[in-house]
Image (tube, rainbow, N blue to C red):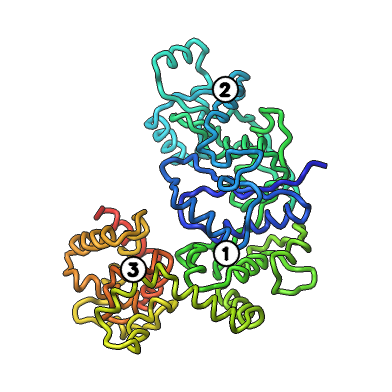
Amino acid sequence: MNRVRTRIAPSPTGDPHVGTAYIALFNRCFAHRQKGDFILRIEDTDRERSNVQSEKDILSSLAWMGLQWDEGPDCGGDFGPYRQSERSEIYKQHIDQLLDQDKVFRCFCSGERLDKLRQQQMQTKQQPGYDGHCLQLSEGQIAARLAANEEYVVRMKKPESGDCVFEDFLRGEVRISWDQVDMQVLVKSDGLPTYHFANVVDDHLMQISDVIRGEEWINSTPKHLLIYQYFGWQPPVFCHMPLLRNLDKSKLSKRKNPTSIGYYRAMGYLPQALSNYLGLMGWSMPSGEEKFTLEEMTEHFDISRVSLGGPIFDIEKLNWLNGKYIREDLTDDQFAAQYTQWAFDHQKVKQIVPLLKQRVEKFSDVVELGGFFLNGIPDTDSATFAHKSLDALLQVKILQFTLWKLEQSNEWKRDIIESELQSLARALDLKIRDFLFPLFVAISGKAVSTSVIESITILGVDICRARLRQAMETLGGISKKQAKALEKEFNALA
Ligand code: GLU
């Protein structure tokens, strides 16, 4: 039997997501249970959206959770490079092979033509997708267009009728009609591969035996299987895991639940409790025990025990489990040491001290003034937000716009945050003092506090997001309709 090799293949385009840790955990347990390898591969072919900071954060968050990998961009291995942006030459060789064999084709269609096509398909309620226009080009026509240096993408050919049928390890037979599958772009006009192509080439070359990933990829699997077939490669076993859900069963989203691993770290959860909690998502120990270590989970791991009903990510339950870890696993000395390390991280303290020094008269004033740097979500109610001229709706708008602005900015620096908030205040025609009022309350729990811009800078995006969201809730929340209207208004400001 071939060696078991699994992988987690995050795209570094945002905050490290708990869903990534969940999939990593199951891949790791599956591989290690069978003395196999667990690989981390960075899928950064989308050059516009990928960024180095996100990659760093993903690696450090997974490592913090104890989900170390055996091969990866940081530690190497026999199948590298493990970052797709460093594998362009490999993809080029592979696509050339498929072009030579006529398995794929060059498409010269302009963006305009494709937009029109999409519009027509929408009007006539057809399945959107490429219509095969460039399949008709003769060799001579292709050569002429290449000679004229026309831009093109490479698309996959696909069967015209019938179904793609495959076995999913957890779901059994899956049947997807080829009508539903697009002639996927495999290589973009900049010569870089899309996710689908790079993912398959790499899974094959890295000898991945089992692809364990989120169920959102099921509909992509026919495309992937077709690529395996084009090359004559043996596909891996596919296993699509149920997605994590919010309490209301919708797909886990940061609108309803903090999704960034950074948030749980900043809030002072224990990494082993978080990873244990993720192990309870759709899975259970044969003994029914809910508290277990990663080693115990690995030892008893059996993927066929995964249940497909969408697992609910419930913070209350995580809190309960984390509390259990604190009480049962930490000695008083360990608690003291770990708490001190979490609360008084030297870098953070160094930033906070100048803010406190200006305002306190004695050390015993410190907690009253700066306690919010250590607390979770401030305890506020609508009265805390009472203001002489700003009503609740306007405050919600300020908070939401601030959140969007902060989330857009990829540099979390004081000066940038300050100038962005100032320009927002101007755009909303508000005095900066008034504009900052709801932010003060949301972030520190009080109308007067240390500089809110400094505080936001120090607290970081994960904690600020959670506090701004909670403040919006306290102020009455916003409906989907209101959110849409606000989004429109916000986009018009930019
Ligand atoms: N890069 C994909 C992601 O971001 C990987 C999906 C897969 O596992 O095939 O989730």
Res 184 → quadrant: top right
Number of the label disc, if any, that sits on residue 456 = 3
Q: Amino acid at mark 1?
A: Arg
Q: What is the number of callouts on the image?
A: 3
In percent of the image, x 42 and y 13: which residue is there? 147
Q: Position of residue 345 (x, y in %)?
A: 44, 71
Q: Residue at x 83, y 42 (%)?
A: 1
Q: Position of residue 161 (x, y in %)?
A: 65, 32
Name the residue type under label 2.
Asp
Residue 371 percent across, percent down from the top left: 38, 81
User: Is the residue marked by circle 1 packed among few (<14), some (14-19), or many (20+) residues within 10 Å?
Assistant: many
> Quick one: label 3 or label 1, which is nearer the N terminus?
1
Residue, far right = 1
Give whichever of 133, 386 is nearer the camera.
386
Residue 471 in sight in this render = yes
Give the numbered dot on residue 245. Answer: 1
First of labels 2, 3 by sequence position: 2
72 above or below 299?
above
Mark 2 or mark 1: whose residue is earlier in sequence: 2
In the rendered image, is residue 438 in sight?
no
Q: Could you classify mark 2 by the number of other residues whose Cα lies within 10 Å: few (under 14), some (14-19), or many (20 or more)?
A: few
Mark 3 secondary-structure assignment: helix
Image: 199 above or below 337:
above
- Is label 2 in a helix, a strand or a loop? helix
Number of residues whose C-alpha sits closer than 10 Å to that of mark 3, classed few (under 14), some (14–19) or many (20 or more): many
Residue in the picture at 28% in, 76% down: 450
Q: Is residue 287 above or below residue 79?
A: below
Between the residue at mark 2 and the residue at mark 3, the CA separation in whole angstroms equals: 50 Å
Between the residue at mark 2 and the residue at mark 1, the CA separation in whole angstroms equals: 41 Å
Residue annotated with mark 2? 96
Q: Residue at x 66, y 39 (%)?
A: 78
